[in-house]
Image (spheres, rainbow, N blue to C red):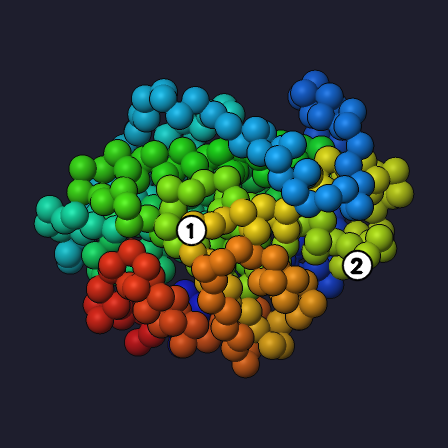
């Protein structure tokens, strides 16, 4: 089993594609919410609103100034055998800085570019081992930390409208991450890929409906987003039922318009690869299948006889698929050793 599978199992497990058999943590004091978060709740969104309308009416939420210059702060450079690891950050269009690792192969390329997104309890560190394996295949690889992971010691989910603001920020930060990759002189902008694990896979479906510069989206053990995960029909599940009723309703109104299930069907012409597990205690088979079926063509689906931590074969399959999609060298992949 590859060395980072255990890290995924222990560190990446979602609470929204996560270990939600446990009761959600509700902060004793609600976090400060900017005034805009309250304004966003004035339009009530129900589960019955047509998905196409949700997509079209909310797509603008993920806009940013694409023409603004990309600035990168480099904190350190580590030389490895065949590549370098750059500890960097870049400004988020929503405020603050996005911590990231940028791994660049030796040589002149041109190389593919791959963006990695961790699970709910992870950070850029979680996928660094995977990034180290992927860079050897001939790709510039970047792994970022999501907004919640940038604050030490805090829960990644608040069940307040802050979750909406941070999810929107994450998608915009990932889009800006595409700008960072394209800015590298040895990256072929026509050969971009994405791999998200667990929560990162759920958010990948949202990103796929927004960001079409990425040619191939690998979605490992994801479902259709936080609302999908925390509800079964109209009933709260996975510990969400312990959240006070008024708090639940406010949160659902805020999150429903940006649930990934409304966006993954608009990924085309980008390709999708869904990987799910038959014995996953964190992502139900029903939710996984709904996510897969909603995804636009072209797409590929694979199921594995495992739990939420996928086996080594899943990573091999992902690399082989990316080799077809964006031209990396699968024979150089050593992660399954």
Real-space CA distance between mark 2 and mark 1, rounded to the nearest whole angstrom:
29 Å
**Mark 2 or mark 1, earlier in chain:** 2
Residue 34 is tagged as none
Q: Residue 148's spot in the image, x, y percent?
A: 56, 39
Residue at 63% in and 51% down = 261
- Residue in front for this viewpoint, 266 or 254: 266
In the rendered image, which residue does mark 1 sit on? 270
User: Which quadrant: the C terminus?
Assistant: bottom left
Disc number lying in front (2 or 1):
1
Residue in the foreground of this view, choosing between 282 and 58: 58
Residue at the bottom extreme? 305
Report the residue at 84% width, 53% height from top: 234
Q: Is residue 230 left or right of residue 125?
A: right
- Identify residue for label 2: 232
**Horizontal side of residue 328 vs 3, given as left or right:** left
The answer to whether residue 279 of the structure is visible from this angle is yes
* Residue 164 picture quarter: top right
Circle 2 — which element?
A: strand
Q: Secondary structure at mark 1?
A: loop
Q: Tell me where residue 138 sits by quadrant.
A: bottom left
Say few, some or many: other residues with alpha carbon within 10 Å of mark 1 (under 14 / 14 to 19 / 20 or more). many
Mark count = 2
Measuring 29% from the left and 56% from the top, which residue is drawn there? 326
Decide if residue 195 is on the left or right side of residue 21: left
Q: Quadrant of the N terminus?
A: bottom left
């Amino acid at each position: 089993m590859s060395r980072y599978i255990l890290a995924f199992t222990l560190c990446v497990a979602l609470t929204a594609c996560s270990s939600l058999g446990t009761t959600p943590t509700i902060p004793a004091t609600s976090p400060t919410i900017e005034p805009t978060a309250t304004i966003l709740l004035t339009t009530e969104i129900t589960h019955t609103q047509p998905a196409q309308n949700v997509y079209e009416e909310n797509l603008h939420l993920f806009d940013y100034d694409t023409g603004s210059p990309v600035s990168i702060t480099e904190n350190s450079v580590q030389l490895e055998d065949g590549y370098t690891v750059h500890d960097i950050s870049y400004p988020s269009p929503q405020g603050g800085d996005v911590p990231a690792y940028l791994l660049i192969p030796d040589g002149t390329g041109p190389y593919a570019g791959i963006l990695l997104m961790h699970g709910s309890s992870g950070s850029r560190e979680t996928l660094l081992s995977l990034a180290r394996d992927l860079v050897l295949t001939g790709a510039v690889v970047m792994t970022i930390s999501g907004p919640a992971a940038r604050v030490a010691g805090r829960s990644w989910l608040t069940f307040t409208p802050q979750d909406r603001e941070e999810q929107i920020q994450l998608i915009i930060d990932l889009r800006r991450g595409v700008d960072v990759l394209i800015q590298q002189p040895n990256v072929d902008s026509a050969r971009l890929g994405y791999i998200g694990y667990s929560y990162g896979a759920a958010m990948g479906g949202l990103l796929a409906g927004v960001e079409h510069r990425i040619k191939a989206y690998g979605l490992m053990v994801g479902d259709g987003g936080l609302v999908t995960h925390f509800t079964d029909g109209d009933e709260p599940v996975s510990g969400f039922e312990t959240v006070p009723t008024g708090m639940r309703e406010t949160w659902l109104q805020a999150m429903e318009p940006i649930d990934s299930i409304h966006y993954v069907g608009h990924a085309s012409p980008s390709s999708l690869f869904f990987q799910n597990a038959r014995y996953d205690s964190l992502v139900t088979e029903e939710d996984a299948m709904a996510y897969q079926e909603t995804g636009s063509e072209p797409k590929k689906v694979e199921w594995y006889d495992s739990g939420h931590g996928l086996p080594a074969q899943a990573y091999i399959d992902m690399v082989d698929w990316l080799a077809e999609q964006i031209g990396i060298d699968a024979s150089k992949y050593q992660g399954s050793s």
